[in-house]
Amino acid sequence: MPPIRDVMPAFELFQPTSVTDALGVLSRHGADAWPMAGGNDTFDWLKDRIKKPRVVVDLSMVNELQGVKDAGGGLEIGSTTTLTTIANHPMVKERFPMLAQAALLVASPQIRNVSTLGGNVSQDARCWYYRAGWPCYRAGGNICYADTPQAINREHALFDADRCVAVSPSDTAPALVALDAQFVIRNGDAERVVSAEEFFVGPGIDITKLTSLQPGDLLTAIRIPNTFANKANYFEKVRDRMVWDFALVNIAASFDMSGTSINDARMVVNGVSATPYRLNSVEAFLRGKARDKATADTAAGMAVEGAVPLAHNAYKIPLMKALVKRAIRGDAAWTS
Amino acid sequence: MDLLTTARSPWGESIFTHISWSLFWASLVGGLLFLLAHGGYMLFSQHRKRPSEEVDQLERERTGLPAHITRHGFVARAFHWVMAVSMLVLLFTAFLPIVGVRFAWVQWHWMAGLLLTASVLFHIFHATFVLDFWSIWVGPKDIPEIKAEVMREMGREDYPGPRPGKYPLGNRLYHLAVMVAGLTVIGTGIMMMWRVRTGLVERNPYIFSDITWGLTYVGHGLMGVGFVGLVIAHIYFALRPEKLWITKAMIFGTITRREYLENHDPDRWKNVA
């Protein structure tokens, strides 16, 4: 079914100027409402006429949702803060350069100027079978077109595939998981704070969504604790086109060092699973080890245990191993 | 409201994809309403076992009967409980996510499905070659019993007609419904094993056409939600006071001689021990 790229389907547009008003609109329209931040994900869906929300809530005029604030040595970043702002912000660059780097490597400058942190972590899967409007599991159907003997699935999942093999396309998501970020979500008068790991959900839990956001929810801020502030970290993204592309695989890692040995680490790989894939066994192995080649080589083998390649994505296994090694050794990322 | 959901396949065909989950709620509410309606009716209904004088007479006539009569052997009871556990796991794993309890349910679901399939295959073999195969079925020969049961249910306690053999009419009708629904969910569920990663078969979603798959999912869904109502009814009857003797027999295996004579036709269930 070729997409129709002429005009978007009609919808009612709301442009609230406060969080309270935004929450009111979202609450009133529930599942019919589509919150929109930068619009890069939204307009793809609308112009292709695949998603047809009755109500669009444009959040770009809600100033409360923008900006970077100090939070006890950590940071609180408004959900509609642009990626350009994050990539260039002195506090982000000083305390969490990995996040600045991840934001800087998203898409192109023009896109980063309008894309937001909240939008980047909440964007939908980029599997083209799904984006083309085919009735796959993620679209509410009963098949994964990307996981068939004939499928083109070079960009798809290695881990935790449960019927659907789409991956999380976000660059900032693994960085936020590696920094143990907290996501502040409001719905009506209620507020809940979930960890980055809880924010992202895999197909086993909910096959039609990549996040735990529910109708009426508004992601208002992302809080990054000071746990890994000013500490060693690493981000690297591998993509087909250096100028502008989604990650084939990316990696984010935070290290708490004691001399030359690792006290604690959080390592997260994206592009290999529907959620940022945390390397728990590698993290446990790294504690007390030196950050050297021998450690990196062992950890790389552990990182890919359990990988189930599809017909065309087995290359991601050595790629992931290489990224894990580089992150542990601290090699300069060639994408920087 | 669409009871079945449809989509357009990549080849432009209109295909079924699922049933509407509103049917799940319909089955759940229907089962609960039946429970309330039947419970209310039974408050005013007479129980349909034999009058005690008639049972006394039968006891005097049939002196060779043991004090305890085996209603369900160990193997039959083991099958029943294995099937019950697998069925409950199947229902909870299928429908809890729909009511908002999120968890990775697919693996638990197909594993419970395999257990159900194995237990049903065993049951078919056991019932065919060991048990009295025809005792559970309903057919034209049962019309007089059905008529008598209906009349007694309507209050004509003295209406003449046969008492049930080993299985009361309700048991046999329920078994028929469960058999149809069960074989459908098992058949469609086995087909679906080619759609998920199990490690048992090589995954290939293209072994059937999209239309066939759509019908498979619809059949699985319809019978699945049907089981919600059926299981509610089953548990309800198992817990009703006048049926507890049957439930106890499914746990301990036997009924008393008097329960046998009160509720069964000794001429239609002869081989008792």
Image (cartoon, coloured by chain):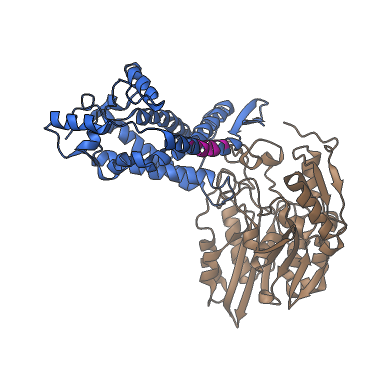
Chain colours: A brown, B blue
The answer to whether residue A106 shows anywhere in this view is no
| A159 vs B258, nearest the viewer | B258
x and y percentages locating residue A321 in the rendered image? 57, 60
User: Which image quarter: residue B128?
Assistant: top left
Outermost residue toward the front?
A: B53
- Where residue B218 appears, as percent x and y from the top left, is 55, 31
The answer to whether residue A222 is above or below residue A132 is below
Relative side of A282 to B171, left or right: right
Direction left: furthest residue: B64
- Quadrant in which the C terminus of chain A is drawn: bottom right
Position of residue A107 in the picture relative to residue B227 (left or right): right
* Magenta stretch contains residue A47: no
Q: In the image, is residue A33 above or below residue A223? A: above
* Rendered residue at 23%/34% (across/down): B260
**Total marks in image:** 0
Range covered by the magenta-colored residues: B26-34
Between B143 and B18, the one lying in front of the other is B143
Q: Quadrant of residue A24?
A: bottom right
Instruction: Answer yes or no: is residue B93 visible.
Output: yes
Residue B234 position in % (x across, y down): 41, 38
Residue farthest to the top, as pictured? B140
Quadrant assignment for the N terminus of chain A: top right
Q: Nearer the viewer, residue A31 or B202?
A: A31
User: Where does the image place residue A95, in percent across and percent down from the top left?
Assistant: 74, 75
Residue toward you, B120 or A1: B120
Is B235 drawn above or below residue B209 in the view shown?
below
| Prevailing secondary structure of the magenta residues | helix
Residue A133 versus residue B154 in the image, above or below: below
